Amino acid sequence: MQYFVTSNAPTTHKTECVVVAVFEQGELSASASVLNQHANGYIQTIIDRGDISGKAGQTILLQDVANITSPRILLVGCGKKEATSENDFISAITASAKLLNDLGATEATTCLAEIDVKQRSAEWKARQIVISTETALYLYSATKEIKPAKHPLQKLGFFADDNAEQLELAIARGQAVATGMNLARELGNLPGNICTPTYLANQAIEIGQRFETVTTRIIDESEMEELGMGSFLSVSRGSREPAKLITLNYNGAGDDRPVVLVGKGLTFDTGGISLKPSQGMDEMKYDMCGSASVFGTISAIAQLNLPINVVGVVPSSENLPDGDANKPGDVVTSMAGKTIEILNTDAEGRLLLCDALTYSERFNPEIVIDIATLTGAIIVALGNHATGLMANNQDLADDLLKAGNDSFDRTWQLPLWDDYQQQLDSNFADIANVGGKEAGSVTAACFLSRFTEKFTWAHLDIAGTAWVSGKAKGATGRPVPLLVQYLLNRIESK
């Protein structure tokens, strides 16, 4: 998709389709009102007739309207005029993008950025239009034949009066985020027999080849053994696929201390000996969405050439039952020297992450954030709307909460109190890998916190937000928008 900004008037601009908002109770947006006046009240007639009520996501296409240069006008419902929410706005963008793509308009110009959305800025709206448009038009085709639109939407314009430069920057950032999200989607949607740890490693190498600012390194099992990563390697023992520790080092700010993003890369998770139920196990290909979000974020910031240093660390493995796989009751030794009693082999993500967190110390990080589809308990707590957040530093937690609100890729903070640590006591090791059925998401973070004492750290549990189930099953690309926004906010605060 290509995007552009124009200062032409909606009534005279030459475009295949102009997109304008209508609201409930028959109210028109500013551009819709101008078009209506030039069309001698025709748009209002359509609304008064009841052809569109203004409910968010409703659409109606008008063709060859008198006195209007564009051959098509697309009316899009945006909810209540004085109370259009972010979700209403995204519904309107998604509906308009899909309709434009299907009707064969290869180029269109949108006026949706002009409407009020809970005091969001014009730049936020432009960025969200790009992200939501790219999301709406994403199609998975790696392992199935699809029939793309004969004349798909290829160019989308924005009307602007005096803020063209700001809109162009917002559009560029939206494109980078959308590209990163689609990369994360594609990796997440690939089946486990294709997207293996080796495949992820090769994708990291490709990112390093694409951007001069990114250096990639792949560590194999023999080197991990030399490093003492007994916890990580205990997970991969049950798989024929060799584990990989992947690092992507983006250098955009010289010698500044980096932000380290640690992404869980379980390319398939059966639960191991503690086998999961068969129903829904196909979705465990999504257990590497944390790593996919790291790939997407590194790609986005490299595309934007941001002045910041970021290191992506991705521990990648499969978790399968085998004669050599972890058994409940086994004790393994982590890179940090702590022994771990494995009470549940399906709590394997933390066994990878703890060694990856210890490995992150060598980068002298200013901040470390891990991203993981870690617990089903977070879905019980927060559903599929918010990412779970826990941190050993409240300033970092506040910054991530703000970035979530800024990007509308929201998080919600849970406690990380010492009260929960005792649930991880073990009679046979320094720590158990699970803490019982109570507060499962919190105790998982408490486990990780034992390996973060030397740096400022936050944990994002994305098990509820990384993918959707059912008929629309697929990866979401979250939390790439949150992570990119957090990094942008850090840059702008300096």
Image: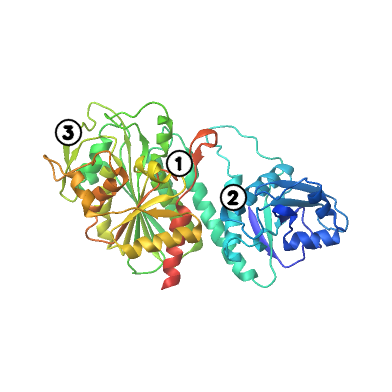
Q: Residue 225's x, y, as percent?
A: 20, 44
Q: CA distance from mark 2 to mark 3?
A: 47 Å
Q: Residue 197's x, y, as percent?
A: 36, 40
Which residue occupies the foreground of this view, 122 or 491?
Answer: 122
Q: Which residue is rendered at x = 43% and y = 69% of the image?
A: 491
Q: Amino acid at mark 2?
A: Glu
Circle 2: element type? helix
Side (left or right) of 113 relative to 315:
right
Q: Residue 198's x, y, as percent?
A: 37, 40
Residue on which the image places disc 1: 188
Which residue occupies the foreground of this view, 325 or 475?
Answer: 475
Any mark on residue 329, and which? 3
Which residue occupies the foreground of this view, 151 or 347?
Answer: 347
Circle 3: element type? loop
Label 2 or label 3, whichever lies nearer to me, is 3
Residue on which the image places disc 2: 134
Q: Amino acid at mark 3?
A: Gly
Q: Mark 3: give few (<14), some (14-19) or many (20+) Cα within 10 Å.
A: some
